[in-house]
Image: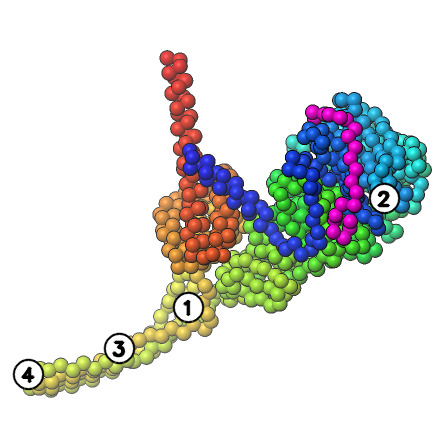
Amino acid sequence: MRLFLFMSCLCLLLLSVSMIELVSSDDQILWVQTTNLGEQIYAKAEGIAVDDSGLYIVGYDNLPSFNDYEWRIEKRNINDGSVIWSQTENIVPFCPHAVCESALAVTVDNSGLYIIGYCLQPDPIAQFRIEKRNLGDGSLIWNQIENLNGNYVYDFISDERSREMHVAVDSSGLYVTISSYLENKIEKRNLVDGSIIWNLTEPSNSLHINYERVYDRISEITVDDSGLYFVGDTWDEAQSSLEWKIEKRSKTDGAILWTQISEYRDSVNHAYGLASDVSGLYVAGYVKSEADGYTGWRIEKRNLADGSILWYKEDVNVKPPTSFLPRVRNYIEIDTSAVYMIVIADFQGKPALVAQKRSLTDGSLLGMHNNPPSPFLERLYAMAIDSSGLYTSHYPWKLEKWNIDLPPPITVNFASDTGQIGFSPYGYSGQIKKYNNGDTAIAFQGVNYSIYPFPASGYIFTRWETTGGISVTNPDFDFTIFTASSSGTLRMVQELTNTTTSTTTTATTATTTTTDTTSDTTTTTTDTTSDTTTNTTTTTTNDTTNITTTDTTTDTVTTTGTTTTGTSTTTETADTQTTSPSTTPPPTPPQQCIIATASYGSALAPEVSYMRYVRDQMIGSNNVGRILVNGWTIFYYSWSPTIASSISNSETMQSVARVILLPLVAITHLTASIYITVAFVSPTLASVIAFLSGLSLGMIIYFVLPIFLISMSYRKRNVRKRLFQ
């Protein structure tokens, strides 16, 4: 049991290491600042805004006592993130709830800083609070409080996604939105004292879809000279899906000028980011389209006059987090040169904080940078931009400034006379994308990719060739790892399977001399034979491909025997065949993981290829590792074919086997992480430790743990029997 607990802790540790393995250096991050309020602090930076004089951050902390939550407002230097001033406001002296009060959003103009949020006062009645503060020192200019519906209390405490409050400002007023499961509120307030100019309340539909509670909500607002723009979600009964909803309203009274709703059937979609300039409206969010089979990030540019789409781009590499990262919102901002998006997401199969820079004209990718989020539960809460950089706020209270000149993407050109090249991020279990000759794809520096050959009929893979800043781990290996430092070309070299082999026979003469004293008669015999024979040769490769070639051979055999009294000399001519292939034979394919192959239906399935890569190219990359791998292979092939045959004959068995193999896939990733970590010291030592670790974890999960559970169940059953006897 102690061994099991120890190995479980080891698995969690290694898993955490593997999760933050991705992907790029920190050279794009200009500075990072965290709170210095003490070890007991529980603080969250919820909103962020910037002007020429500084960076403004709002949220909450739990000081002065550990359970006493309060609003926190800071102004920081844009050059290094140092604090210029800070203000706190303890609205409720003490509250036992996990979240009692917090500032959620902030905006700024040349007259002051506007902050919105909530508090539970009196408990448990929720109140909306809006403030205006001095830019120079953060002192309070005015504040307004509005009682909210009592049902907001449940929303605030139970689910942070329901705490939707957003604010925007122009010269005519301050615009506020408040969303809950019950209703959406839209208000325009006076800049001088915060009084309401006009307000609207609209009902919100709420329901559960696939264990996710969804509702009509406003996710972001922005304003320009012609109107007020909203983006969010709405349930579309006709489409049976949660859709993006984009609206333009009048600044005078909030009347709707136009509404656009996306059409992604049978799916749950979320629109989050919104920004505008004189040329259009930019919207970003996630799409999960069951009809199109697409899941990933999407950005659109829409016409300001009617909301029609001008262009859109999608990125399948950026997906909603599937791990421990609950904050899936993506944020967009624009300047005169580009539109920027930042989000914590699953980037090519691993969690990362991703920043993209795209063209205002057509949405093409101009630059991208990604960095592993740390610590493990980090969340992204807001984004701001100025001419010097991109600013983000996080939980726990952390601020980052990113270089606005994100690195340009790397273009990969695929070349193959026939067939296709499979290309996917290393270790990513999504579908392999296949590229034809002349196709291009975007890769990123510091990211490993898996490449797979898919030769056309009648061809077999020979090797990989690269040009430019592209390299592969093993050019002669069918499945291997691809990296890129700059743009270049990846070529798949193939050859025809009907390779012709010619055979030539030459004569070799051997002479043997012996001493004989019993014969005085000399006999000389000469025999010359000329044979012409047509031979058919069949060559069998490891993957059971039969290649038949025909050759014509002319053999000349001459035998001369000479016997002399006292001395015997024999001269014989033997045939020696030399085979000269017309082309180089392909490399021998590695042994397949036949149970995994049968379970996933293909030896080129990402999971199978990855297992094979770890086995052969990591653990088996040195002599000691190959001995371990070969020994395991002999044992594995002594019993696995029978199991693989049973699995491959039943779709039900394949489905069950894929579930059973999930721990093995995880173990393989952990084993790879162990190898990579130890290989810096010694590749041989890395092979031994990785092999033993993988073997031990497999034994624990597939043998020790089941036996332990069965034993515990048996003991409990015996105890029950004794109790009832």
> Which quadrant is the C terminus positioned in?
top left
In the picture shown, does residue 677 fall above or below 666?
below
| For marks 2 and 4 on the same chain, the one whose residue lies earlier in the sequence | 2
Where disc 2 sits, the SS reads: loop
Residue 360 placement (x, y as % from top left): 80, 55
Q: Which residue is mark 1?
A: 549
Residue type, numbered disc 1: Thr
Q: Residue furthest top?
A: 725
| Residue 651 percent coordinates (x, y) | 50, 40
Q: Are marks 1 and 4 in contact (CB under 8 Å)?
A: no
Q: Which residues are magenta?
A: 77-97
Q: Residue at horizontal 16%, vertical 82%?
A: 513
**As shown in the figure, which amino acid type bears the numbered disc 2?**
Gly
- Three-letter amino acid code at disc 3? Ala
Tell me which label, 2 or 3, sits earlier in the chain: 2
Graded by Cα atoms within 10 Å as few (under 14), some (14 to 19) or many (20 or more), the crowding at tag 2 reads: few
Give the mark nearest the N terminus, 1 or 2: 2
- In front of the other: label 2 or label 3? 2
Q: CA distance from mark 1 to mark 2?
A: 88 Å
Q: Residue at (69%, 39%) from the top-left corner?
A: 37
Please name which of the two marks, 1 or 2, marks the residue nearer to the observer: 2
Task: Specify the quadrant that holds the N terminus.
Answer: top left
Mark closest to the chain's N terminus, 1 or 4: 4
CB-based contact (under 8 Å), mark 1 and mark 2: no
Residue at mark 1 to residue at mark 3: CA–CA distance:
25 Å
